[in-house]
């Protein structure tokens, strides 16, 4: 199984480990040290060998930073992890701080000793992060010092070895373009920016560019690697040779100079010595990269990773793969939901039972379809009652709840298939709640659904960003004095990251939505310590069909996730005729797509029919 | 009358005047010169004495810039003025350039001669503008040179004298706060920013701070002046003494050091010599201000004009005034619309007739109410047929059209009263168009109305910016492949600027909407060379009443404009029950508010009743 359910973290180790780290810091003449969650690639998932923050503090969330001073330490987390940090971390050792209210820079401005020397590992922080902190420390005449060797690594005696996951090829039939074609486009982008080279440190960008996938981190098929692209001449790919079969090595060797990762720093210096102008992403790449180039005499040109946009605009082959993967994933969801419908009302299932079943069903359906499940896209959020109100809930033996009749069950999950990455959330009514609870659930669920439908069916002019349409998913909750504290949608990769930029439907989503981009559509509603609702489909930005009389080029969304949406939680009086029509048409598509899926049982077919019956009166 | 209808501009003068300017430039050793529309105060309206761009080129729009090189010249305008510039300017002398596609900086990068010396008047451009142009010129090894004396002024032989409009006091009963209270708040803001002083160059900021109004420019009751606020100590107010009566002078002299405007530059140098840290708005104030302070040794701290936010958040007295002004203005609009309804179907009225009538009615109603009309808020947009598709149309004898039966008539206007500034747009069906035209008008009008209602009735969480809700005014047009090319709403002042920041409902409106802010709600729809529709009310941001079950602090809008909205252009099948309810409730309020207005005729009362009857079936 890809997902485990043990309680990963032991808060009691924090005190010992911080003591060990402080001893190393003292020897190194440092008054403090910053421990971010990131590795050298700044990704969402890090290998066990780079899980420094988890080792030190116990905190296993996907975003966080610790600061260790001589006499105090703090851990900075966002709202998603406000509860989790208290379970995983010894808060008498690490004071939890909301990074939204008090960023690390602001905290340091207040708490760093005058004239302090605060250490950091320049491979683990971006230039943008470093700049903010340097500026804050300057107010205390304090200094941010890049360390040569990470002092935490010196204290980390049982550190696992770095991963050596085998690299596989993403064939052109799925990637849609060959590598020379992609390299030519990127060389053109470098020419447009008037730079000689670009440094890639994001393994997802490297995976897309070289049509490779890896197995170095959980959930995302990345091979940890670095690359240097050139406006003219061959790219360099810095990757451990033991990850490459002879066949893959030969193929890649024809396109790029293959080098060991420990040659990367030298290559950066060589760029500098050649006085190259190098494109560098100050918010996405490690400070060490830019520093090495500058130290050797090169010029840094700040700009976004040039692969981001080409990768985000999925081509026809990638979209065909995504639709195929969604159909398969929908069949698995159907099997799971039918099982849940049969089993849950007895009140014996737990969240872990459900998550395990879902992974088994995904494996089974995928294998039978000839496209084996490669990974789950992330740890399935299998959550009921109050657990469903925790946005990034991961069920463990310690938190596992029985799915009780009368509760809502929220399941957010996805599969990694070679032809696509899926991400779907459904909220299911279990048994029969009391009338007033049911009314409450229905009201909130229907408002969330209205937001979902508003996004799904909207048209918008070319050039519109996700930030501009995010409110449409919220307006109906807002009118009831309600909201949800996460974005409406994130970008999704093509057998790559389930969270991919720059496209987003959120306050911070300033990139224009472009045809081919895949984003999630997942409004929700949560009452802390009580219940949670979310409805998520993936949608693709498409050129909108022309409307008679329309005078603008418009875009629209195609919903590609295909699985029944709970219809017993709807308050029809809250839906307009248009919304009901969308809902029924969606289910008509789901039924037409899934009813012929090979191997469905009679029970599953009947469940599908019942789940997809029209709600129009 | 406040509004004139002559064709202001004579394009044939451009060639002569540019020749005169080029002669002066040559003497001064300059290869080019930038002529912006702005004066020293960077306001929307400039006095005739500062209308340099209009003198030189003929262009009278509210935004534009000309560049004069030795062998070519160009004028940069936005989409609003794409048509107007061709009427007003000799385009064989000034090439019109869309500033959106090609900003001046980009144009100079292409067309400025290598090593050129391009002159500019540092009192007429902001630091932000200067920086962009300097950067572009650097690529041609060219230089941007601040001139001591504006060479255009040397060529401008018949330049009018600067205005000396009398200053009046805005009493505390209307302003809601006295000047010491405002100065104390501002001193606190300066302390928060850790600066010693702030320079105000926007006469609207000065008007608010000192509770004064003026008559120096059309339409907006500004007194052209500068001010220096201090964290500690008395402010300085630089204003021509002949604008002040003895009474006003005495009152102001108790609060501030009154000085002549020509002492302002010296005061900036004095700030510098005192090594002051001075708050300066790089997007709102002239480069010359910052340069003078820095040259004398002071430190510039960039930041928004500190008055903007306090001024935008209207207090209870200002809001009471606004509501009173709206009621009065609504009565005038009612009288006007009733007249139009009676007169227009005969097909004899012109756009100028309508605009004149509206100003007369506003004067008449206001005088009878004891609150005389001080100005029109802007030149009334009285437009029919294709003229209504021109966003900033100003009717003149040359463009005047007969309001023809079967056409739509769009009237956008407002009044300046001592208790408030109004701005209202109505689109009226004249006579009986052919069936297919009426269907088209109704479809588009109803979509615009739906956008208007979506904004009017929405609730949103505290902290939400206008940029995030702008799409709600457009979603229904978007769904039909349509859009409009202006923001949904602009801020409005309290007997001050009809366009006031920072609040906006637009793509660029990043300031959070706060209680007390007044904004317009004016979605529209336009078909070039055919027809135009816009529906505009002013709305006030208010704390939303609590909804049972709501768990957030929400804001909502109170619509304060009170005048019938054309109901013969509605396609009811496009409206939801909620939208119909909003529309009928609004008209119920309009009827209740206006039906008792003193002096209404029987005909007007009957017209009001017909205009306000419910559309619900």
Image (tube, coloured by chain):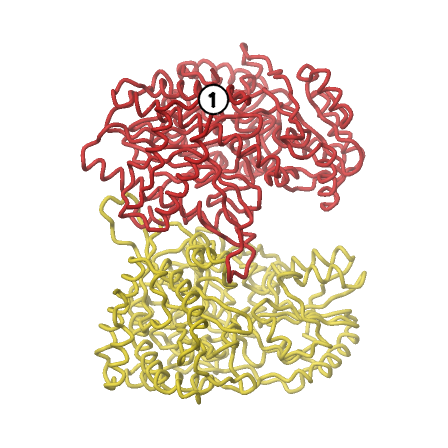
Chain colours: A red, B yellow
Height in image: B41 above or below B476? below
The one of A46 and B113 positioned closer to us in this rendering: A46
Please give left or right for residue B421 compared with residue B32 in the image: left
Q: Residue at coordinates 33% horizontally, 51% vertically from top-left?
A: A577
Residue at image point 57% right, 45% down = A515
Q: Residue furthest left?
A: A435
Question: How many residues crowd mark 1 within 10 Å: few (<14), some (14–19), many (20+)?
Answer: many
| Horizontal and vertical percent position of residue A129 | 56, 35
Side (left or right) of A270 relative to B531? right
Disc count in the image?
A: 1
A190 up-or-down from B165: above or below: above
**Which of the chains bears the disc numbered 1?**
A
Q: Position of residue B100 (x, y in %)?
A: 62, 61
* Left or right: A84, with B230 as reference point: left
Task: Give the labeled residue for mark 1.
Answer: A365
Residue B255 appears in the picture as rendered = yes
Q: In which quarter of the image is residue A439?
A: top left
Residue A490: % across, % down: 49, 38
Task: Give how far across and how far down residue A81 sits, in percent.
Answer: 40, 29
State which quadrant residue B296 falls in: bottom right
Instruction: Using the image, determine if residue B183 lies above or below residue A479.
Output: below
Residue A262 sits in which quadrant?
top right
Q: What element carries label 1?
A: helix
Residue placed farthest to the top in the image?
A: A158
Residue B314 vs residue A367, the one in the foreground: A367
Whether residue A33 appears in this view of the structure is: no
Residue depicted at x 60% and y 16%: A163
């Amino acid at each position: 199984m890809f997902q485990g359910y043990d309680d990963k973290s032991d808060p009691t180790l924090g005190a010992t480990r911080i003591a060990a780290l402080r001893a190393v810091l003292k020897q190194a003449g440092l008054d403090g040290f910053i421990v971010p969650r990131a590795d050298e690639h700044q990704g969402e998932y890090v290998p066990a060998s780079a899980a420094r923050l988890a080792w030190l503090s116990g905190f296993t969330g996907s975003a966080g930073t610790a600061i260790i001073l001589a006499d105090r330490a703090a851990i900075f987390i966002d709202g998603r992890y406000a509860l989790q940090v208290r379970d995983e971390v010894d808060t008498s050792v690490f004071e939890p701080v909301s990074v939204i209210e008090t960023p690390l820079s602001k905290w340091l401005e207040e708490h760093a000793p005058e004239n302090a020397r605060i250490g950091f590992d320049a491979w683990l922080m971006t230039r943008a992060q470093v700049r903010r902190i340097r500026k804050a420390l300057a107010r205390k005449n304090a200094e941010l010092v890049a360390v040569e060797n990470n002092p935490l690594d010196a204290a980390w005696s049982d550190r696992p070895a770095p991963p050596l996951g085998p690299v596989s090829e993403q064939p052109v039939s799925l990637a849609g373009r060959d590598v020379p074609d992609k390299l030519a486009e990127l060389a053109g982008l470098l020419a447009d920016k008037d730079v000689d080279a670009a440094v890639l440190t994001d393994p997802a960008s490297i995976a897309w560019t070289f049509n490779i996938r890896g197995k170095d981190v959980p959930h995302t098929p990345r091979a940890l690697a670095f690359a240097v692209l050139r406006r003219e001449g061959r790219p360099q790919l810095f990757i451990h040779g033991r990850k490459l079969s002879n066949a893959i090595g030969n193929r890649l060797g024809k396109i790029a100079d293959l080098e060991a990762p420990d040659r990367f720093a030298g290559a950066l210096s060589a760029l500098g010595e050649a006085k190259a102008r190098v494109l560098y992403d100050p918010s996405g790449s490690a400070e060490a990269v830019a520093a090495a180039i500058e130290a050797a005499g090169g010029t840094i040109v700040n700009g976004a990773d040039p692969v981001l946009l080409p990768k985000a605009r999925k081509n026809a082959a990638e979209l065909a793969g995504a639709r195929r993967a969604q159909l398969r994933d929908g069949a698995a969801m159907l099997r799971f939901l039918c099982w849940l419908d049969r089993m849950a009302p007895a009140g014996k299932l737990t969240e872990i039972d459900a998550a395990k079943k879902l992974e088994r069903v995904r494996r089974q359906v995928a294998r039978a379809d000839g496209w084996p499940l490669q990974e789950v896209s992330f740890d399935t959020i299998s959550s009921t009652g109050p657990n469903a109100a925790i946005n990034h809930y991961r069920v463990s033996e310690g938190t596992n709840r029985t799915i009780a009749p009368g509760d809502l069950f929220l399941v957010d999950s996805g599969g990694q298939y070679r032809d696509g990455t899926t991400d779907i959330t459904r909220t299911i009514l279990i048994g029969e709640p009391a009338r007033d609870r049911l009314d409450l659930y229905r009201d909130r669920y229907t408002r969330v659904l209205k937001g979902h439908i508003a996004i799904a069916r909207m048209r918008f002019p070319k050039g519109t960003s996700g930030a501009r349409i995010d409110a449409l998913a919220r307006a109906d909750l807002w009118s009831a004095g309600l909201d949800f504290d996460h974005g409406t949608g994130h970008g999704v990769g093509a057998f790559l990251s389930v969270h991919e930029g720059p496209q987003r439907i959120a306050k911070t989503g300033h990139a224009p939505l472009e045809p081919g981009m895949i984003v999630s559509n997942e409004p929700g509603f949560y009452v802390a310590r009580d219940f949670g609702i979310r409805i998520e489909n993936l949608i693709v930005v498409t050129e909108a069909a022309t409307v008679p009389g329309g005078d603008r080029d418009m875009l629209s969304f195609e919903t590609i996730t295909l699985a029944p949406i709970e219809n017993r939680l709807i308050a029809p009086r809250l839906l307009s005729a248009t919304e009901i029509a969308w809902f029924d048409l969606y289910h008509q598509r789901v039924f037409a797509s899934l009813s012929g899926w090979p191997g469905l049982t009679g029970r599953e077919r009947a469940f599908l029919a019942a789940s997809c019956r029209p709600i129009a009166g």
